[in-house]
Image (cartoon, coloured by chain):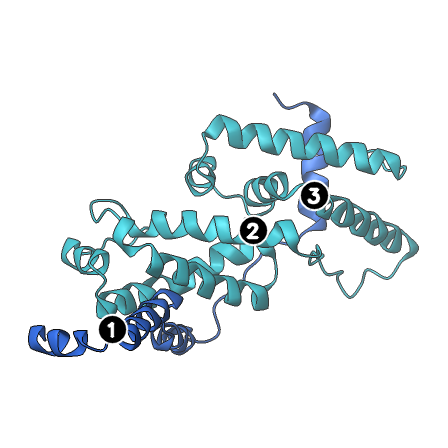
Amino acid sequence: MPELEQPSELLEQFAHGDLDAFESLFRQFQNEVFRWIVRIVRDPGVAEDLALETFWRIHRAHARFDPRRSFGAWARRIATNVALDHLKIARPEVALLEDSPAAASPDAAVQRDIRERVAGAFCQLPAKLRAAATLALVEEQPYKEIAAALGISIGAVKLRVFRALRLLRKKLKQQGIEP
Amino acid sequence: MTEPNDDKIGELLKQSIRPAKHELQRDLWPQMLRRLQEHSAAVPWFDWALLAALALWLCLAPGTIAVLLYHL
C-alpha cells in the first residue's frame, strides 16, 4: 500500500472526531484498504464489506490515533485484523489460475487437478499462516510491510511462511502429491 | 531456514493461486455515512436507564420537580 503523506492538521482533526476529516481520509484510503484486504481474503465482495468494517473500527478508535503516526499504516493494521477475523470463521475459497485456451490436453487436466488440490490444502491452513504465506508468496509483498500489518517482527513473518509451507507439504503428501 | 523443497512448494503455490488484482469498483462512503447515521440515531441503553431512573425519582418524590425546574 503506497504511503500517502497526510497533512498533520487533517490527522489532528480526525483524532478529535471531525467527520469531514474522517471522510477525507476515507476517500483517500478506501481503495488501498480494499486492495490490502482482498489480497488476504481473495474475494472482492467480501473485501468491500470488510473495508467498511475496517473504517467503522477506525472511526470508533479515532481518539486512540496518534496524529504523528502514519494513518495508512494504522489503517492497514486494522484492516489486517479485520481480514484475519474473517478468515478464522469463513468457509475457505480460493481463486485458481485460469487455464489458457490451448491447455486442453490430458497433461493440462492433471496440472489443473494438482493446482486445485494445492489450493484446497492451502485453504485448510490456520488463518494466520495462510495470510502470511499469501501476502509473502502469492502477492509478493515486502516482508517489512507484512510484518507491520500483522504487528509482528520480520522474523516471525518468515517463521509463519515456513510453517505454512511445511504444513502444506504435509497435507499434500497425505494426498499423494510430492513436489 | 528454507530448503529446496520449500522453494518448490512455494512455486507450486504461486502456480495454483493467482494474485488478487482487484480494484474498488464503487465509492463506499455513502454506505459508511449510512452506518454512521444509524449509529448516531440509536440511543444508548445507558441513556434510557438514566431517563427511567429520573422518571421513577420524579414519581416517587414529585416535590422535587419544583427544585429541578428551579435549577434548570
Percent x, y for residue A51? 46, 62
Mark 2 neighbour class, 10 Å CA radius: few under 14, some 14 to 19, many 20 or more: some
Q: Nearer the viewer, mark 1 or mark 3?
A: 1
Residue carrying label 2: A85
Mark 1 residue type: Ala
Residue B61 shows which numbered tag? 1
Q: Is residue A68 above or below residue B20?
A: above
Q: Nearer the viewer, mark 3 or mark 2?
A: 2
Percent x, y for residue A31? 42, 64
Determine if marks 3 and 2 fall on one subunit: no
Mark 1 neighbour class, 10 Å CA radius: few under 14, some 14 to 19, many 20 or more: few
Percent x, y for residue A131? 58, 44
Mark 2 residue type: Asp
Mark 3 residue type: Leu
Q: Is residue B47 above or below residue A110?
A: below
Residue at disc 3, secondary structure:
helix
CA distance for labels 1 and 2 = 51 Å
Residue at disc 1, secondary structure:
loop
Q: Colour of chain B?
A: blue
- Chain of the residue displaying label 3: B
- Chain of the residue displaying label 1: B
Q: Earlier in the sequence, mark 1 or mark 3?
A: 3
Q: Colour of chain A?
A: cyan
Residue carrying label 3: B13
**Residue B56, quarter of picture:** bottom left
**Residue B5, quarter of picture:** top right
CA distance for labels 3 and 2 = 23 Å
CA distance for labels 1 and 3 = 74 Å
